[in-house]
Image (cartoon, rainbow, N blue to C red):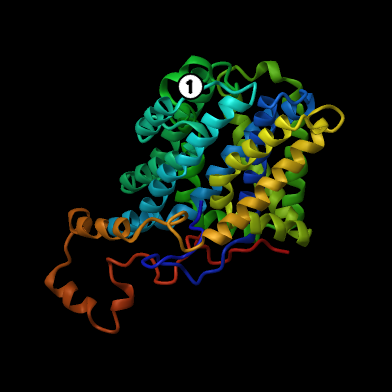
Amino acid sequence: MSLPHAYPGARPTSRPRAQWVDTAKGISILLVVLLHTSLWLRQADMDRIPAFSTLNTAFEDLRMPLFFAMSGLFAAKWLAAGWGDFLRTKASLLVWVFLLWQIPVIAYRIIGGHLLPGMVHTDLGTQLETWAWSPLRANAELWFLWALVLFLLAGRLLQKVPTGWVVGSAAALSVMWSGLVWPGATGLEGGELRHLVGTGLYEAPAYFLFFIAAARGSSRVCDGVARVPQTVWAAVAVGWLVTFAWFGAFEDQRDQPGVVFLCQVCGVIGGSALTVSLQRIRPAARALAFLGRHTLEVYLSHTTIVVALASVLYLTGSPLLAVPWAAWTVVAVALAAIALGLLLGRAARGTWLLEPPAVLRRWPGSLRQAFESPASPATSASSHSPATSAASPHSPVSPVDTGSPSPRTTTARR
């Protein structure tokens, strides 16, 4: 996830963002919201919709792998930035919103547990204990932020390791985790293992490959996408859809080691091809790209909004929870959650709801010397000259950096 906006101390870039990357992020967050909406409306005793269950399972190979891959493209600069810049901006933001936005999660789980028949009844003490353990055992829908912090830290610590070793090891971990560790390889619930280690640790190892491969090859990926004609990407997208349908016909084979991994790799490639091809349909591409530029606001708020709307529908005995309206209700509630999340993000811009307090942005500066080697006297003297100050070794991120990929050409050929 990219920074929702620049706050004092952040360093955005003047390089343009690649719209196809934002489009891919928009598709990913849309699928995430639809998944959570369908699951939470089921807790409100909504009639089961087999089509949504099938689609949610089918898009599992696209939804999170693509989300992590696109986040990796945007994270490339944070792997090279100084520790002080990284801790003061990106890390402090992700940790802050991860901890802060669990407050509404606690609220909706307690209230929903009393109001909705399908939710587990819980109390404040249990939820506070869960919150206290969340830095080590991430749960609920915010686990993505937890995983993103770990991936960024791992990427930085592995900077000196050759890319082939890093990507190869991450691929082996993904194959093992998705094919041997995940119960049934593709289950949405995860059973006892998810309950034991938390959602974050249960999910994250299978997705590190997509994040680190994209981050390590950010410039090559964006430049390569720009050089390939859109007709080729359209053909790849069609091929992916055919393969996607073929694997769907062999669902019973997905518990074999390596099958889920292969499906996820195809999902990232096919999903990327689809988003590049969508650039020809400008209204759809722009709408999804706009959503992709505001994923953080939507991701943080959508589940609370969905549970609130589900509670209203259930308590009023709305017929919209029954067939034939149920499917349309899922879509309507998901779109409402996205719209309200965007409005909330606009209203909260520049506040502590979406950025850490100033004190959290200042304290990592004192650790800068602990992580970065001090400059030699010659370097220190030259770094103050007008000719070299813009290229200071302690300023790896441009003063106008927004967290976008850094390709030489960032838009797909049209």
Q: Is residue 23 visible?
A: yes
Q: Is residue 21 visible?
A: no
In which quarter of the view is residue 361 placed? bottom left
Q: Foreground: 116 or 293?
A: 116
Amino acid type at image mark 1: Arg
How many labels were placed on the picture? 1
User: Residue pushed farthest bottom?
Assistant: 386
> At 63% across and 34% down in the image, what residue appears?
36
In which quarter of the view is residue 135 placed? top left
> At 63% across and 44% down in the image, what residue appears?
28
> At 53% across and 24% down in the image, what residue appears?
178
Locate the C terminus and report the quarter of the image it occupies.
bottom right
User: Residue pushed farthest right?
Assistant: 324
User: Residue pushed farthest left?
Assistant: 377
166 left or right of 71 in image: left
Residue 184 percent coordinates (x, y): 58, 16
**How many other residues sit within 10 Å of disc 1, few (<14), some (14-19) or many (≥20)?**
some
In which quarter of the view is residue 46 placed? top right
Residue 369 percent coordinates (x, y): 18, 58
Residue 119 percent coordinates (x, y): 59, 23
Answer above or below: position of 58 versus 70. above
> At 17% across and 66% down in the image, what residue appears?
375
Residue 384 percent coordinates (x, y): 22, 79
SS category of the residue bearing label 1 = helix
Q: Which residue is mark 1?
A: 194
135 left or right of 231 in image: left
86 left or right of 34 in image: left
